[in-house]
Each structure stands twice: as structure tokens, then as C-alpha cells.
Image: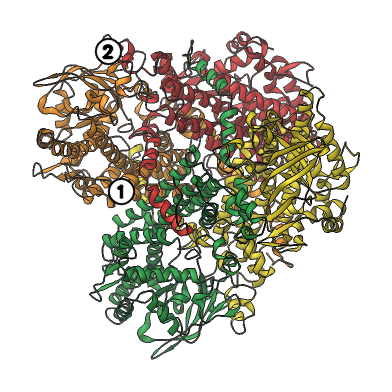
Chain colours: A green, B yellow, C red, D orange
Amino acid sequence: MMDGTAYTQSLERMNSVVFIYGKRVESFWLHPVMKPAFNCLKETYNLACDPAHNPALHELIVAQSPLTGGPISRFLHVIQSREDLLARMKMQRSLMRHTGGCFGGRCVAGAVINALWSVTYDVDRENAGKTDYHKRFQAFLKTAQQRDLTVMGNITDAKGDRSLPPHRQADPDLFVRIVERRPDGIVINGAKLQQSGAPLAHECLVVPTTALGPDDEPYAVAFAVPGDTAGVVHVNDSACANAKFMVMKPDDIGNTTFGMHQSAHVLFDHVFIPKERVFLCGEWKATRDMVHRFSDFQRFASASCRCGYIDLCIGAGLAIADFNGVAQVGHIREKLTDMSIDAETLYGLVAGSAALAGPTASGVVLPETLSVNAAKIYMNDAILKAGQRLAEIGGGILVTRPSSCDLEIPGVGDLLRKYHQGRKGVSVEDRLKMARLCESLSGLAALTPILSVIAAGPPATQRLNFRLMTDFDRDRKAAERLAGIVTPAPK
Amino acid sequence: MMDGTAYTQSLERMNSVVFIYGKRVESFWLHPVMKPAFNCLKETYNLACDPAHNPALHELIVAQSPLTGGPISRFLHVIQSREDLLARMKMQRSLMRHTGGCFGGRCVAGAVINALWSVTYDVDRENAGKTDYHKRFQAFLKTAQQRDLTVMGNITDAKGDRSLPPHRQADPDLFVRIVERRPDGIVINGAKLQQSGAPLAHECLVVPTTALGPDDEPYAVAFAVPGDTAGVVHVNDSACANAKFMVMKPDDIGNTTFGMHQSAHVLFDHVFIPKERVFLCGEWKATRDMVHRFSDFQRFASASCRCGYIDLCIGAGLAIADFNGVAQVGHIREKLTDMSIDAETLYGLVAGSAALAGPTASGVVLPETLSVNAAKIYMNDAILKAGQRLAEIGGGILVTRPSSCDLEIPGVGDLLRKYHQGRKGVSVEDRLKMARLCESLSGLAALTPILSVIAAGPPATQRLNFRLMTDFDRDRKAAERLAGIVTPAPK
Amino acid sequence: MMDGTAYTQSLERMNSVVFIYGKRVESFWLHPVMKPAFNCLKETYNLACDPAHNPALHELIVAQSPLTGGPISRFLHVIQSREDLLARMKMQRSLMRHTGGCFGGRCVAGAVINALWSVTYDVDRENAGKTDYHKRFQAFLKTAQQRDLTVMGNITDAKGDRSLPPHRQADPDLFVRIVERRPDGIVINGAKLQQSGAPLAHECLVVPTTALGPDDEPYAVAFAVPGDTAGVVHVNDSACANAKFMVMKPDDIGNTTFGMHQSAHVLFDHVFIPKERVFLCGEWKATRDMVHRFSDFQRFASASCRCGYIDLCIGAGLAIADFNGVAQVGHIREKLTDMSIDAETLYGLVAGSAALAGPTASGVVLPETLSVNAAKIYMNDAILKAGQRLAEIGGGILVTRPSSCDLEIPGVGDLLRKYHQGRKGVSVEDRLKMARLCESLSGLAALTPILSVIAAGPPATQRLNFRLMTDFDRDRKAAERLAGIVTPAPK
Amino acid sequence: MMDGTAYTQSLERMNSVVFIYGKRVESFWLHPVMKPAFNCLKETYNLACDPAHNPALHELIVAQSPLTGGPISRFLHVIQSREDLLARMKMQRSLMRHTGGCFGGRCVAGAVINALWSVTYDVDRENAGKTDYHKRFQAFLKTAQQRDLTVMGNITDAKGDRSLPPHRQADPDLFVRIVERRPDGIVINGAKLQQSGAPLAHECLVVPTTALGPDDEPYAVAFAVPGDTAGVVHVNDSACANAKFMVMKPDDIGNTTFGMHQSAHVLFDHVFIPKERVFLCGEWKATRDMVHRFSDFQRFASASCRCGYIDLCIGAGLAIADFNGVAQVGHIREKLTDMSIDAETLYGLVAGSAALAGPTASGVVLPETLSVNAAKIYMNDAILKAGQRLAEIGGGILVTRPSSCDLEIPGVGDLLRKYHQGRKGVSVEDRLKMARLCESLSGLAALTPILSVIAAGPPATQRLNFRLMTDFDRDRKAAERLAGIVTPAPK
């Protein structure tokens, strides 16, 4: 298995074409907007190789492969039991709590690997041996496990008009498709958009994004392709959040090392895929299972991961509240408790989808569909609420703090420091660092949402007004009269 | 009344000390992170002077002052009736829908002006004529109205340990206080943090941030001070969202002109305030009313404004859904309806606080407390939900779109354009612009929240799974049996 | 104006045909399931006639009529200003807080009177004087005001297959319709179902339940008919909640005097309506306005009323918590505060719909549509949540208390009393009475909901487990590490 | 194992003292308010004995006991693995979907049995063999399994002032306690209130209701006592919902056979408990584990059961919507989907608490605490919302339908039938039956909640108003202008 250094060297050996904000970047993994995602992946390599780095995570991140007979990264593991599912769940939560970052480049692979493993098995069986997709895929996966590769699951197509199926789009390439079939392989056109961590992967494992009908046969294609193959181009996304990594100093960004999710558009321009790397080729009927299986698995993985994210929000909320001297205030304790309820509800639900899981024909065990879909729905709100609660706990300082440069302005820096003290014993710098982490974790950008929460007093202030100003006595008297109570009890 | 040009010239004539990200900036209003807020204020001057610019808004933004006998900016108006409150409410919503930006520098003034007008009146009456704060304040306000100034309400103190009152803080300056009383005025220390639009104002109108007790007497101080007075320093906040305006091209930012909220720390270092500009000076008992009144008014103003914000989210959501070809999909229509319900619930609640309003002794009419506090609580969730819904409607493109620079990469730009088509008839550039606006309005930063909503399919996909996979027939049969239905009706 | 005795006598003089649970009942208003509703209406007569009974409510319940020039019941008042709307709103809340019961028989009239007043005005104007519906209606209303009648608004038709319009139903009578037009009047068939308080009214004021198209012309009919006219039959509903009034002793029912809502089916079997009592006769185009106006007004009235209902829930919750010795417990105070926020949000929203109201052509002022619809939506949840919160506060005793008969079992009654003590100083009987009122107000029947809330400990217990068992320290350490904090602050 | 007839005979052989609404009742299980609960328990006996009655449930309800070596009721099973937990979960959901009723008398036993099994094991071990509680309990349980008894877990004490511990209450008996210790056993005073199904059980298994301190030593007592022992008195609760079973005809009650939850107060007046039936006797330290373990298990069982309850609500909602002709309407489909999401979220969460479960020292496997507590919190809302949604789907007919007696009134019954038709092909009687079941399942009593939901139109009507009346175009134009779109796309 590779360690972080070996992983870095493996990227150096590749010739991937990567554009960031309009420019081709050679050592793209060092570019500020991609480095945090790179650090996350590198960390997975270090954790797997060095038990001392974090023993508990090391345990979780290494699995035993029946394919290679040796230890492999759990990211590349074929799920063979409910215990495997639970181990994956635990790894995802712990990893997220460890870095607060995204492992997109490795994480999605689990969804595609397990779905392809089972679907190619089914297809070959249905074809009564006339196809050998499963064998091809086994071979590919075994090599990936042996070489400890980062395999990226490529899913989301361009889609064009969302109300139309692939074959009715204005441009036939709006979903990835076979443009030519040759004896030795196929030629591919299309794009996979918003692929988390794509340029950081050695291999792209491409599958259809949606269940297809008979008219969409050329779109029913699955294959693996190295990220630096001729005709493959990566263009990094341009989310506004990227900007902070491009212009701000590390001290002014929360979770500088790991805290930047990165995604890229992967464009395929007449890319040749040799036969042995093609795992579906026109079997449109199989796409329904394919899509359901990888979707469910990805819901499983991401819901697990977000439990760790809420853990971090709890920790950051508690810390900033303590730094402000209000860790014991009732409504803050309630918010921390609410976050914990959300984290454990989500976690329990994911565990439940493992407990209710059943095996596919191939032996792959996939999470039970309804509970894992319920988990995804729950997660959606829970993450947003965690961000909102963090903002309510932390207050305006999340977005209004001075920068590290401001602290160095002669004459002014000292005043800023003076006025950004929290409770006694807390260093101003630590308080500002935690505020930055809170901003980052909250997922809220500066403008309206945090201001809406905080300005004119946080909601706790307005609630207090209700407690103080409601005419409780009037209401109680009315109730006592209607209940037929003649002499009210002394209070 | 000033127009936009006159307003700009008035800023040029000032000598305000403003630092942005560690550097003193002279023409600070042109700095990328401050220009949008400046544009918002400038727009209020243009709207007031030029009826043709936007007739409906012009009507709303100009009020008649009993103090000057002429037309003034409604931002500086003393509220004398429920109709005045309703007019202010309408102006706030329309202005926000017009710009999607923040008028912090002018808007908060309404809260402080109306609170001070009524509280100084009460204090003078209680002091049986021994003080003349109200007369002083009338004189100040009349001049501000006549000169059409931007008056900033300065409220939020540094606060230090939030569990301690001002006089028990480790540093006595953590709340703004009188450090010296002279025959001709007072000397002030302290800081007002996170002041929206502060450097763009001509005058700072400073009031206490909290209700004070007898031991906090030196903190019971209210006064007006020009923003460029000696000893006053402005330091811009360093919210991560600032970064996009510092590094990205206008085409890559949603609502480039107006869409950046700006706040600053205002530091007072031994600032002298002449007597006639002091409006409270030790009257700690009055601070309770002061705080309640400006808080309620600011809740009123901001809740009104957020209705316009949700209007914009509705419009942007509808547009991006249409560009994607899914404007008629059920769950999207429901989300747009939900946003409209939130907007009108909030608006109705603000109108209700006006309908239930009563006059203070001074004649100032303030919104009814409980309903306006309820509005603020409602707004808190409504804004966050609007952002979440917008992300669910728009999808991943909000954060994963290519930048304008990417579109110009030879050979690649055309591919990006090809793969970012939406429905027929929509230009790719317009689709990307609307995605940017959606990102900006959603208030969500890239990383986890939008990804949590979108990855592995938006929640609507998971709901669909429930509709398709729930065993409705099993449940119906169980119910029919228990109801005692022997021969179920034909379906 | 009539007092309660005169109202009772007026019912005695009528010959209404009323069936309750299968039997014709002569003095139906004394039947246990109808008496509480009768008591509510009687109370409105007493409040209007006797200022000393409840001065504040007396003020609210009497209005000045421009039609009669004298004092009338506000229930019969034509709304001529926003102030009239606000007065109605206040009356509804106060009346509900006064009785906790339903004034269905009188309350709905406001919706129909104001809608008909304005719609007949519009129709006559459009018909350029060829119809005189408005004059007819004025005459009817003037008499009703002078005689201080209870006028019931009859709205909800039988409807049959809800997916079909009236003229396509299997039976033409499933919506009230004109079966014959004579020179002196019309003959009517149909039914109005679930009419609150219908048998207790002197007059039925019948209008269409839905906006009609041209093919539904015979269904576009509005008229007034005395409740004891030949061919009119009332059949009381058979809600399971009726049973408690039929079998239990008064002491075992919460709010025995007023707390039973009653509704009836009103069947019209070839009923003749003389011309001067017909207010619409085929004008299908007018039904859209008709329906919108009475719906909005009824939403206005019922949302106002429910504020008083939540007031009672607050009072009852506070009382039972105090009787149990837990009035100061944090989560109970929060629940009471939540209820107050709901009450004031609802009230503010209703007031807002008055503030934003505009006049119709006839001068009638109706609540603004969107805000009053938002109020109804808000009310829906708020009432259910108030019931849930009341159950959480009060606990199992709401449904598991012993009955008054049990307390009299020799040897056992004393044990029951012993084991149903609450805090010191509270009489067991009062505690049980308040529990009964809480059950009644909660609106929850015994079985699953209250049990779901309470069994295995109320939710507050489970939350406590989270507070005690969450590994907050683990999460905080993770956050401090990611924020870059090297030496955590002492705690 | 007993069948239903044998169970009935076993009750006949007992001499239990049971009062219902003030009167001693001999064959209490036939009393209308107790018969449904009796039917539920009887059904469990029939299901266990007769595989043909319901094969799937038969499979679930029978477990293999390591204690007896033979088949036993799963209600009496000691949980030895995660699979046992999952089997119990499945049984609870299926049983509830089968009857819609409560198995209180048997169900709670699982919580107490598993808690006592493990706690007595721990206590004996800590006492180093000086106590033999575990052996005693084993003996008791083995007999109960062999004789297939209904064992009731008795938990909830009278509690008095909830802010005081047992030993500080005004009356020492407010928690069950040892009043005398004899060589051959102990004498007990106290009461267990609101015990579901208590009189229908053969044995009461009594444990403390709360974690106790050293001063509460006499309250740390656990024991088993036959329900007809001298000094044990049962008094049935007097929930208002009882009344419908006392006065209404079966056809007018939803789920007549099973649908009435019953609870009773169990009073212990100097009851002697022989030594071998005493399982804790002063070990106050053990009460903490005891309470946690049975609480968690009961949360597990009841949350599982409520999934089946929501299943029934889905089925009933679908049926009544279909009978009304609106099964395909969008908002109704959404509500059914929402209920399914809630059911599967709850189920997944319970399954997760099994997946995360670990063994106690005794080998008993208990659900993981945080996830099962989260399940209970989730269930609380889900059940209330299911009731609310059912009311929104079904409408007013839930509470306003005519009774079976009304349908027989000469001349009137036919009219009622005519006006209660639904869609073509549905019998009026079936429609009324399903409405009754919906009322019963909704858990809502007639008065305010259902009326609040339905009157003035269900919420879907108000939402429709928003969809029709929101100025979407205004909002879209504002968004397009701010996004910088010059020529909007054709629509």
C-alpha cells in the first residue's frame, strides 16, 4: 500500500490535463484550491500505512481483500457482509471528524465498485456466458487494489434539458455515449460534470447517471480510463468559495489544511477505451439496477460521513460558546443537544440500512433502499440546521472578525486585539481561529443568512422577550376558571 | 436632497480612516469589497432624486418631514403613524427586491433615530426639564434631514465575556463608555463591532447595546459623531465571502453590483464629543427602553427587507428551473410556493406589528413588540430555508459551474459551453449567470451544505423512491380489514 | 338586543326538526352533545346585554350598525374599515379565551354576510339595475340585526366525487341547487354538511361552496331560510368525541359547560324560498368572488379565535406543570414560550391581513388574501403543536386519571386520592380537573398519540440522555485541532 | 403454549379485583372499554398457536427459548443477539399493522424481563454470590415461559411532587416501597399508575420507575406478583375516549375489535411478596442501569410498533382519498409519501439501534442507547404528523359523519345515504367505515384540531391560492435583471 509520499509521486508521474480558473496547471495538486482535497486523499494513504498516525482510524481504513488476499484500502473493498457495511460507516464518520474535508476522489469509488461488481455479475449471468464483463471488472479491481489506486466514480452527465432523455437532447453528447465501436474497444464522447476530486484520481470509473430506455442504448456504457488518457480534460469548478483559498492567508480561513471541497468537469473528447476496460456496452436494461445500487451506496457513504461533520459542528459550537463565556447558557446547551440528536439519528439510520441489508446475487451486500434514502433526506436538513445552529451559537464574529493582516496594523492591531477578547484565559488568536472554523463549518456565506440569524439579536433574545412579556397569569386564570377550579392553589 | 453623484462627492470630502484587509485605503468606497454596499447607498440617493429611475420606489423612498417641512429620505423619517410604519415596510421590501443588497449604513439609522427621539423625550420629561437631550437630538436630526446625510446607527459593543456586565469586564472599554466628562463635552473609548456599512456614513449615531444597571452608569451614553473625527478608525471585516470580490471577475459573481454585504469595526480611541451632540449621559434607567425600541424597530426593518430577499429567491429559482427545462415539475412548483408562503407570512406579520402598534409619549409609533419579535424568529428560518430550497431547485451547477475564464480556454471553452447547455432557447451564458445569482442568494458556501443537498441526487429523487417502492397495497388492505370492509371497492 | 333567556325562548318558539344519534329531539339545545354549543351562543347574548358580566368582552361584542343606527351584535356587523376588522379579531380571541368553545352558529355568519353584501352589490351593478339582490339582502340583514338573530352561514355541500364538478355528479343534488323556479320564489334541493351549530340558529344563510362554471348555473344560488322551514332537517354529527358528553359525568369532562363543538347536516328536501330571500339565482360568474371572500373572512375569524385557544393551552399547561411541581423546569418553560410565539405569530399575521386590507366596491373591507391564507396555514400546525406540547407538559394523567366515580369507591377512592397528589398545597380534585381540561384542549384522543408522547418517558427524558451521553469532549478536541489551536484554553 | 380460548379461561380462573368507572366488574375483559385490549392479547395467543391464522406473524411471534428448550412467545424471550432484536422489531411492526391495537399487557414485559435478567446478573456478581436474585428470576421466567403467561411490566409510580425524590415526598408511599422485611418475604405499599393492559396479565413484574439515591433504599425493589393477589386492586383509567366504547354502536367506532388502548392504576396495599419472587431489595445503585435498560428496550419496542401504526395510516389515507375520488391529487400523494418516509426513517433507526447493540455481562443484548432514544424522539413527532396528515387527507367526514342509527331514520336515512356518496362504485357504508377508522387512527378528538385543519378549506386550498396569486413574473424579472441577463429566454 502507498503512503502519502508515494501517492504524491504517483500524481507527478501522470500527465493529466487540468485547468483551474482558465489556466492549465501542471502541479495542480499544489494549487491553493485543490490542495486541501489533495491533503485529504494523502491523509488516507498515511493513515493506512502508519498505524501510529491514528490507531483507531488505521484499523478502520484497512480491509482484507478476498481478491488479493491481503490488506487493501477500505475505499476499494467489495462489501461482502453487514459487518463490512458497518465498518465502512464507521470509517466515514471517523475520517470526516478527523479532517472535516471531502474524500470525493476515493469515496465515490465504493458506490461504483460495488454496483458494477454486482451488475456485471447479473448481466453476464443473464447473457448466459456470452459476455465477460464481471471477469474484466474483477481484473481491473484486483490491479487497483494491488496498486492501491485512487479510483474516481464518474457519474453525473451534462444532462442538457432535464425534461428530455439522452437520445432526444439537442446535442447527442449531453450524456456520455459510445460514438464508435471497434474490435479492440470503443470511442467515447461526453462529459461528467461536478466530479469531486476527479483530477486527484488515477482512474476514472465511468457509469451512466440515469436509468435508460431502449432508445438510449449507446448511452448504456461503463468503463475505466486513466485520468491522463489522451482526450480527457479536467476543468476545475469555479465556486465562489474557491476565492478565499486563492487570496486569503491561511490564518484567515477555517480548516486550511483539509477544508476545501473541490470538484471538476471531466470532458471526454473521442477517448478510446480498450475492450478489457469496458464493463457495460449497450445493456440498457441493466442501468436501472446500476443507478439504484450506486445511488444507495453513495447515500450510505455520504450520510455516514455527515455524522462526523455534525460532530465537528458540535465541538466547534461548544468551543466558541466557551470562548465567549456562554457555554452553560440554556439555549446553547439545547442547540448542542439538538445537533447530537441529529448526528445519532442519522448514524442510527445508516446503521439500520446495514442491519436490513440483503445480498445481491453476486454476494455484494447493499444497504436497504428505503432506510438509506430516508437517511439522505434526513441528512439534507440536519446539515443545514447544524450550520444554522453553529451561526446562532457563534454569532456575528463568524463573518465579521478582523483578518490576520488587520492584527498587524500599527496602532490599530492592538486595539482590534483588545476588542476581540472573549472570556478570561482564552487567547484572542484562538478565539478568532475558532470563529473561522465555525464560519467554514457552518457552510454559510457572509451575506444574508448569518446576518438574518444574528442581526437585531439572535433568536434566543426574541424568545426571551416572549418569556418575559407573555401574560401567563391571564392565561392561567382563564384555564382555571374553565376547569372549574374555585380556589386556585397557592403558588 | 443629494443624488448619487453628490453623495460620492460628499464621501470624497471626508477624511475617514478605513482599513481593508490590513491596508489603509483612501477611496475605500471603490474597493471591490466595499463597492457593492456603496452602490446600494448611492442607489438610494438616485432613487430619491430621480422619479424616472423607478417611479414606485421613488414614491416610497421620499417622506415629508414635519421637522423640515419638506421632502426627506424615509431612512431619516420620524415614524408618526401606523401608515408611516407600513410605508417603511413597503420601502424595505421593494428596495431589497430592487438590489438584493444591504443598505446597512442607512437602514439601521431608523431604529436608532426613532428610539432616541422617544427616549430623549421621556428622559427630559422625567428630569422635569433639567436636561435638554430631546432638543439637542431634534437639532441634530433636522440638520441630517436637511443635508440628506447617511446616518449610521452604531450599536454592537465588543462585549468580551458575554456572561459579565460592562463594569465587570477585564477591560473597562469592552463596552463604549465615557472616560472623561468635560464642561464642553465628553471623551469616549470603546468599539462598535460589525457595523454594516459604517465607513459609508457621514455620521455615527452611537447608543448602548444592552440594558444597563446602576453600576454601568458610564456606559449609558448616546451621541453622534462624524465618521472622520480624530480617533475614529474603521476596520473592514474579513468574512471569507469578501474574497470573491477581491479575486474573481465580475462575470463569475452573482449580483456583482449590489450583492456584497459589508461591515466594519468602528474603534473609538479617546474621541471628544461636544455637548450638543450628546443625547444620553449616564441615564442608565433609560437604556432598557432604548434597547427595546431600537431592537424592535430593527427587527421590523430587517424582516420587511427579507420579504424582498425571498421574492428574489423565488424569481431566481423559477428562472434556473426554467433554464434547466424543469419549471413545471411538481416538487419545484411546491418549493416556489413554499417560498411565497414564507414571504407573505413574514410580510403579514410585519404588517400586523404595525397594525397593533401604539404611540410612545413622544408621538413616535413603534411596532408592537411580540409580533415583531415573532417576525424576526420566523425570518431566521425562512431565509435559511429559502437558500436551501434554491439549492435544491438549482442543483450542483450553483457551485460547480465553469468560470468566465474557463470559457475562453482554446479548444476547451467550446466543450464547456457545449456541456453547459440547458433547455433549448436558453443561452449558456445566461444559464451560468443565473446559477451564479442563485449561489449568491442561497447564502450557502460551496463545501458541505450544497453538496449535502445535491450529491447522490436531490431530496426529490429520494422521495420518488418512496413513492415507487412503498407497499401501499399492503397498507391499504390492512386498513380495509380493520375498518370492516368486506368487499373493497373497484379501483 | 336579546339576552340569554330571550335567546332560549326564541329557540323554544321554533319548530326545528333535529335528530341526534338516530332520534328526533324536541328541546335539542338541552341534549348533552348540543348543550355546550348552546351555552356558547347563549353566552354571546348575555355578554352583549350585560356590561357587568365581562366589561372588556361586552365592549368588543357590541358594534354600531349604520343600517339600524343602533347597537348590534358584532357577529352581524358589516365590516367597513380596518378598525372593524381589528375589533372582530380581538373579539374572536377574547371570546375563545373566555369559553374555550365554538360559536359556529354565529361566527360563520360574518363570512357570509360580508361576502354577500359585497357580491350582491357587484352583481346588481354589473346587471345595471336589472337585479335587486343587494336591496333584498340589506332588508334581510337589517331585520336580522334588529331582531338580534343567530344567522348561520351554510356552505359545505355533499360534494360526492371530489374530482367532478356539480353538474357531472352521479346525483344532481350533491350540491345545493334550484330544482324549480317559480314567479314567487325558488325550490331547493341538496344538503349542507358539517354545519357548526346549525340547529341553534334562527336563520340559515346558504351560499355555494365552490366557484362554478357556466354548466353549473342552477347551483349558483344564495338565499336565507329559517331553520324550521318545512323540508329542512337537521341531523347531528356522530363524532366519537360526542360520546363523552352522553355517558360521562360533568366532573370527568374538561370544560363541561362550553367545550363541545357541535356540527350538523342540514338537508333541504324541496324547500321553497320566497323571492325576497333569494340573493343569487344563477349568476355563476359571481361565485368565484363569493367563495374567495367568505373563505378569506372565515380564515380571518378562525385564525383569530385560535389565538385564544392557544392562550388557554398556555394557561392549562402552566397550571398542570405547577400542580406537578415542575413549573420551573427548563423544557416546560420553553414549551410555554413556544406556544406564546405561535399565538402571537398567528395574531400578528391576522392583524397584518387587516392592515393590508382594501375595500371592495361596496365598501366592505376584507382581509388581504395572501396573509390571511398564510395565517390559516400557520394555524393548522400551531393548534396541533399546542396540543402536543400540552400532552408533553401534562403527561399521562391527561388520559389515565381516575373518574369521579372511582374516587367514591369505598376503600379504593381514598387510595386513588392518595396516589394522585401533586405538589404540596394543591387539591387532588383540582389537579384532576386541570388534567381533564388539558386532555380536552389537547384535542388528542387517548390511544396512540398521547401514549406515543409519554410512554417510555416524555421526549425531554430522551433529550437529557443526549446531553449526558454525547461525547462532547471528543468533538471539541477534533474542532480545536482543525482550527489550529495548539494549547486549548483552561475550562 | 396457550391459544386464545385457554387464555380466556386462565383469566376466568383468576380473582382479580378490577374497577371500571366506579364499579367492580367480574368478567372485566368483556367490558366494552377493556375488550379491545383483551382481543389484542387473545390474538397474540391465537397467532402463536395457529400457523394458518397468519403464517408470517406466526413465524415472528414464536421464539426458541434456551431456558425451556422449546418454543415460547417472543414477548417472554431473553434477547441474546442482534438477530433477536431485529426479530422483535419485525414482530412489533407486523402485529401493530395487523390489529392497530396495543399489546401493553405483554409488550412491556420484554423491557422489564431483559433489564432484570441483566441487572440481577450484575448485582449478584457484584455481591460475590451473597445474593441469588438472578437464579430467582430465572426460575420465575422459566415458569412464565412454560405456562405461556402474560407478564405485565409495572413501572410508573404515583410520583407526587415531581421535583422531589421518593424519600422527600409528603406521603412515603408515592413510590412503591418495602414497608416491612420479613424472613420469608417483604410487604409492599404503593401504586403503579397508567399500566397498559394490567388487569389482563397473569403476573405483575414490578420495578422502580427512576434511578434512586442512597436515601431511597426502601424504594429499590423489584418483584413479581400475580394480579389477583390479596391487596392488589386495579382501577381502570377514565380517558374520555373510553366513552365511545361505552355508548356507541360498533359500526360507529373505527377498529371496534382492537382499537382501544386501555390502562389501569394498580394499587398495592400491604401486599406480601414471598422471598423467591423478590429480585431486588434495597440495591439502589442498580436502579440506574435498571431504568436505563428497560427504558431503552421499551423505546425500541414502541418505536417498532409505531411503524406499523403509520403503515395503517398510509393505508387508511389512501383508501379514504380513493373513496372521495382524489387518490391521484398531488398533495395527497405527497402526504402519503411523507408518511412512508416517516415509517421507514423510524424503522431504519430502530434497526440501527439493533445493529449498534452490544451485549451486557449477562449476555442480554440491548439496543444502542443514543439511536434508540433518537427513535423515540422521532416517533413522537411522526405519530402526531401521521394523524394530522390523515385528517388533512380525509377531511371533515372523519368527525361529522352520521351514525349508523341516523341511517335508519325513516325518510331521513335515505337522504343521509344519498348525500354521503363518494366516487362511483364505492358503497356509502364502506366510505363511512373508513372515515371512522381514519378518525380513530388520527388520534385526534373532534373539537379543535380536526376543525382547525379542515374548516375554511384544508391547507392544500390555501397553498393553491399562493400558487395562483403570487406574482412570480415580478420576482423573475427582478432576478434576471440582477443576474445581468439582458434578453430573457423565450418561455
Identify the residue shown where x is 30% and y is 23%: D166
Residue at the disc numbered 1: D353
Q: Specify the farthest residue to the right.
A: B69
User: Is residue B478 in sight in this rendering?
Assistant: no
Residue C146 point in image, percent of width and height: 73, 15
Q: Position of residue D37 (x, y in %)?
A: 28, 30
The image shows residue D317 at horizontal and vertical percentages of: 43, 43
Q: Which mark is residue B212?
A: none
Mark 1 secondary-structure assignment: helix
Chain hosting mark 1: D
Q: Which mark is residue C412?
A: 2
Task: Choose top left, top right, bottom left or bottom right for residue A243.
Answer: bottom right
Residue D438, located in which quarter of the rendered image? top left
Q: Nearer the viewer, residue D108 or A489?
A: A489
Identify the element where label 2 is drawn.
loop
- B469 lies above or below C66: below
